[in-house]
Image (tube, helix red, strand yellow):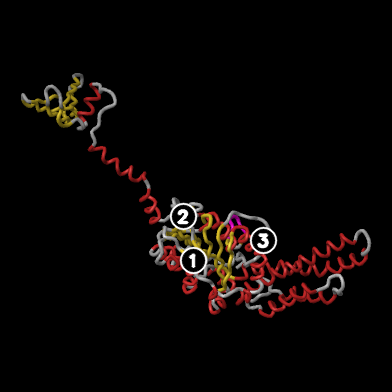
Amino acid sequence: MKDERYFCLEALETARTILLSAVEILPKLRAGYDKHRGTEKETDELSQLYKTVKKVQKEFISIIQALNEFGDEKQTLEMAQKLQAGLLRFKWLEQDYANLCGALAMFAESLPRRSSINTKTFGRLMNRVKMGHFPTDLAHVKRIKEAIVFPQIKVNLLDPCCGCGTALQLFADGENTATYGIEIDESRAGRAEEILDRVGYGTFFHSRISNRVFHAVFLNPPYMYVMKEGGGSHRAERSFLLDTLRYLMPGGILIYIIPYYRLTEDISTILTEHFDDLQVYRFLESEFKKYKQVVIFGRLKERDAKQNPKAAELLNYSLNPDAIPSIEKLPAGIYSLPAKETEVKQFKGSEFNVRELAAQLKKSDSIKQIFSTSRLDTMHRNPLLPLKIGQIGLIGGSGLMNGLIECDTPHIIKGRIIKQKVIESNPDFTNGTEEIREVTSNRMVFNVLTPYGFKTLA
């Protein structure tokens, strides 16, 4: 479909353009350096050469990540890994560029392109985009939970894309928790409501949630992409990560599940800037083979934008999955949730939900006040100022002046209005006719029971 966006293909198209451009410019930059070696221009020429070299080396990281996401290109992936290793060993100021540039050009032309891949491959990509969210395997949820120490106080847990809620329910099982989930699919959200404490319907990005109140976030975002408003796209894994940060309390624990190849430079940087105690574990072989998933743990800290060597380590995992320790090696109890009780005052999904409204109204003082107005009928009420005779008549006639009147001569009064019919005659002597009309009017009557007898005032 022309409107579908596949980030792996876009990244490979960009890489192809960069590599073919480098094939053209690298020999020229090398020639410029050789020509001006030993002159004042040598430094400038060398700087331009190394700038291009670094760009090509960095692009191979993106290529390997994109090929892992694309799948079904094992041979191309192996070639990319060999070329990357060769580029790191290449002596740029000594060796001839002809063979290197030839290899880069041939590799660039071999990369998958939208215009050249077959219908079957498109269908596979489309299905992965539509599936989007891959529920966390429950056996792995149990292993993840073993790493967490829950305090005695009640803790708030958030799953921004909770699916049917089973992963968060299992994670919270047996603990003193309040579980909150957001789910865009109405059917899955309905099932999640049956097992979680609160569920918001609709997209996570337009939900309204209290900030800094969650002890842990269990985040397994959709993979592939999220559409931007007004067109364009951005990666779901990155968007969910950034938007989740404000909901964790200081010291709160992030549990972040993504494919290993999505530990890109930008995501690795976000993680190291905002989290301490970062650890990465890959899923067990059968599950890892299907979805390439890893779980990343981190403890929220004040943002630190200084360069962190941990970012390079995370990025290296996206290129070398065998270096990632298995979740079997995850120690028990290495992360403790903050022992600080907080209240989630606001939690609303982006779409209207009757059950969610009921939960909000249950906490609202306004709804209590609305229903409490019925008590006015039984309350003793006095006028703010003395009533005038006309006001007394209106109140009495409306039936509101009823009951025992305490005064020097106690009495009981009942006011009411009765219908009164009057026949009016209007003779016309000129024509010898007479117009007769029956007029109905309201008549005010007060019945008064006194110690001296019953009286009617009209």
Mark 2 / mark 1, whichever is N-terminal: 1
Q: Amino acid at mark 2?
A: Lys
Residue 18, percent from left and from top: 76, 66
- In this picture, is 388 found above or below 276? above
Mark 1 residue type: Ile
Q: Where residue 340 sits in the image (x, y, percent)?
A: 46, 55
Magenta part of the protein: which range?
227-232
Q: Is residue 121 left or right of residue 387?
A: right
Question: Tag 2, which secondary structure?
Answer: loop
Of the residues shown, which amino acid type is indicated by label 3? Asn
Point out the tag, 3 or 2, that comes first from the N-terminus.
3
Q: Is residue 145 visible?
A: yes
Q: Which mark is residue 308?
A: 3
Q: Tag 3 or tag 1, which sits nearer the N-term?
A: 1
Q: Are discs 3 and 2 less than 8 Å apart at CB?
A: no
At label 3, counting other C-alpha atoms closer than 10 Å, the crowd grade (few under 14, some 14-19, many 20 or more) is few
* Residue 46 sits in quarter: bottom right
- Give the labeled residue for mark 1: 148
Query: Circle 2 is placed at which residue position?
Result: 340
On whether residue 40 falls in the magenta region, the answer is no
